Image: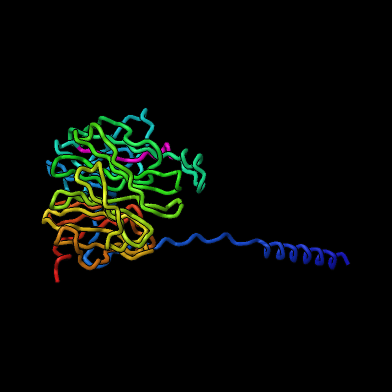
Amino acid sequence: MKLSSTLLLVSFVFAGAVAGAAEVKPLPKKPVPIPTILVGVAKPLSFDLMGPFVNLPDGRVLAIEGNSSRTSSDDGKTWSDPVSLFSEDAKLEVRPERALTVAADGSIVLVFIDNLDRLWRWASGDVKVLQQNTLNVWAVRSRDGGKTWTDLQMIQPGYCGAIRDMIVTNEGQIIVTSQILLPAVSRHATITHTSRDDGKTWQASNVLDVWDTAGDHAGGFEPTLIQQNDGRLRMLIRTAHQFFWEAWSTDGLSWTGLAPSTIESAHAPGLVKRLASGRQVLIWNAVFGKRTMLHIAISDDDGKTWSKPSEIARGGRISYPYLLERRPGELWVTTMQGALRAKVMEADLIRP
């Protein structure tokens, strides 16, 4: 009897344990990231640093990494020790969305948004809440090839979701694209900032508001821009309307002609640049609603028409491109989303 009682007790405990175990739910599996795959004419770069990059007059290339700059004299095989962009007392943190250029006087100019002051709360229609959002825009520059950085200044207070592009015009003006939040209509809008003194001071343009319903990703924002052969400036603006919208300016301060372009795009930013050959090149997500494919196209008629988009990479999400023409015809393409690090040759894009 004693043995039977013991067996009965053991059986009861075992059964209870099994029943209890059956009630334990397994932890949900994290989705396996879809890797970025190079397609077509794209070849891998030999380093992991992300753009934007700039070519320096002495042949080096300069990159931004965190709160520092680094240079390479061997096409990215090796990089210099990091140089701080500002002192720790500044209490700033450079986000990956930024723009970089070399001014007419040789100064390197960086425009970025500060991650440490980020405040984001979305409440559609609640002006008081939306007015409190902040992600300030800053600028800093180097006049000695990246050895030291000076003239740190805030050029746009308030909320800017991303800094995407900056150019130096034929007249020597620096123009950087930016965006603002419009609390009254609960959407984003586009502006630019212009410097006529190589990045020392800045002036804001008029506001470009693409009509849209309210939403935390509604409106027109994250634009790219280029100077046309006739001197006018053309801007291509991200929207949710299946096409980039465009606007035009002669000075970067007054923009007009806001309207849909003929360039189909996903709800993601693109990047347009002029190559040494005189052609324009556009890198973007060319299929509406999909960021899983990145495309490139060229124009021989100053952006009036474009070649058929060529896919250069695919992945889970691959967008926010940066482009450097390292030397004539050699294009370095990197992305913030998808971690693309690729090289594309212009000659491969113009072959029949």
Q: Is residue 153 visible?
A: yes
Q: Residue 172: x percent and y percent?
A: 15, 40
Q: Is residue 121 above or below residue 285?
A: above
Q: Residue 139: x percent and y percent?
A: 29, 36
**Residue 120 covered by magenta stretch:** no
Identity of the residue drawn at 15% across and 37% down: 106
Q: Is residue 122 left or right of residue 82?
A: right
Q: Is residue 111 above or below residue 91?
A: below
In front of the other: 331 or 257: 257
Q: Residue 28: x percent and y percent?
A: 55, 60
Identity of the residue drawn at 17% across and 48% down: 74
Q: Give residue 166's quadrant in the image.
A: top left
What are the residue bounds of the magenta stretch?
Answer: 108-118
Identity of the residue drawn at 50% across and 59% down: 30
Identity of the residue drawn at 75% across and 66% down: 15
Q: Is residue 97 visible?
A: no
Q: Give residue 347's quadrant in the image.
A: bottom left
Q: Is residue 200 left or right of residue 13?
A: left
**Residue 111 covered by magenta stretch:** yes
Q: Quadrant of the N terminus?
A: bottom right
In front of the other: 98 or 89: 98
The image's colouring method is: rainbow
